[in-house]
Image (cartoon, rainbow, N blue to C red):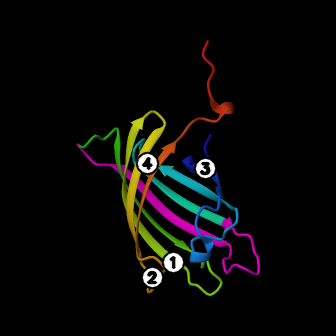
Amino acid sequence: FKPFDLDLAVVPSLKIPTADERRGLGTGDVDGGVIFIVTKAFTEIHKLHFNAGYTVVRKSHENRFQDVLFLGIAGESPLPGLAEQRLQFVAELFGTTPAEQDGSGDLQARLGMRYLLAEGWVLDAAVGRSLTAHPQVEFFATVGLTWTFKAPWHRQSRP
């Protein structure tokens, strides 16, 4: 039984400091968060996602960063006639609260593609743009590799 025929997920995150904090490229500390995802699958390959997340940033007198709330909506669909079982078009619209104490929130949009390399392995790429006036970053691009698997308690044993 799924409530209202929705899929629910909780995605924890952990950010390890790898950038130069003196250049404004991170907090210099380990930060953590969680994203709650509600998915409505209209078909096996047409889905809509609502995301709500929160990132906790370590507070110190040395940094200007603060916790961030994230809200977004995303969709995925194949491109008809073009590798429908492996290639998907994705789009996302999301907003965040200010990451810096004297900063402003941001509203961003992304468009991208996902390609199923093998069962459980997806290569993705997207480009995006901030929709707010005077953003910290106006344009951005991402590339990633995602590995998905069933939790051990959901795996079915074979006779």
Relative vertical location of residue 150 with respect to residue 80 in this rendering, above or below: above
Q: Position of residue 15 (x, y in %)?
A: 64, 59
Q: Amino acid at mark 3?
A: Leu
Q: Looking at the rendering, which quadrant does residue 68 occupy? A: bottom right
Q: Looking at the rendering, which quadrant does residue 58 occupy? A: bottom right
Q: Nearer the viewer, mark 2 or mark 4?
A: 2
Relative vertical location of residue 17 with respect to residue 79 in this rendering, above or below: below
* Viewer-nearest residue: 43 or 59: 59
Mark nearer the N terminus (2 vs 4): 4
Q: Which residue is mark 2?
A: 132
Mark nearer the N terminus (4 vs 3): 3
In the picture, the quarter occupied by the N terminus is: top right
Q: Which residues are magenta?
A: 55-81
Q: Is residue 73 magenta?
A: yes
Q: CA distance from mark 4 to mark 1?
A: 29 Å
Q: Amino acid at mark 2?
A: Thr
Rendered image: mark on residue 53:
none
Q: CA distance from mark 2 to mark 1?
A: 6 Å
Q: CA distance from mark 4 to mark 3?
A: 15 Å
Mark nearer the N terminus (4 vs 1): 4
Q: Which residue is mark 3?
A: 8
Q: Which residue is mark 1?
A: 106
| Callout 2 secondary element | loop
Q: Amino acid at mark 4?
A: Phe
Q: Which residue is mark 4?
A: 42
**Label 2 Cα crowd, 10 Å radius (few <14 / some 14-19 / many 20+):** some
Q: Amino acid at mark 1?
A: Asp
| Callout 3 secondary element | strand
| Callout 1 secondary element | strand
The residue that appears at 62% across and 80% down in the rendered structure is: 100
| Callout 4 secondary element | loop
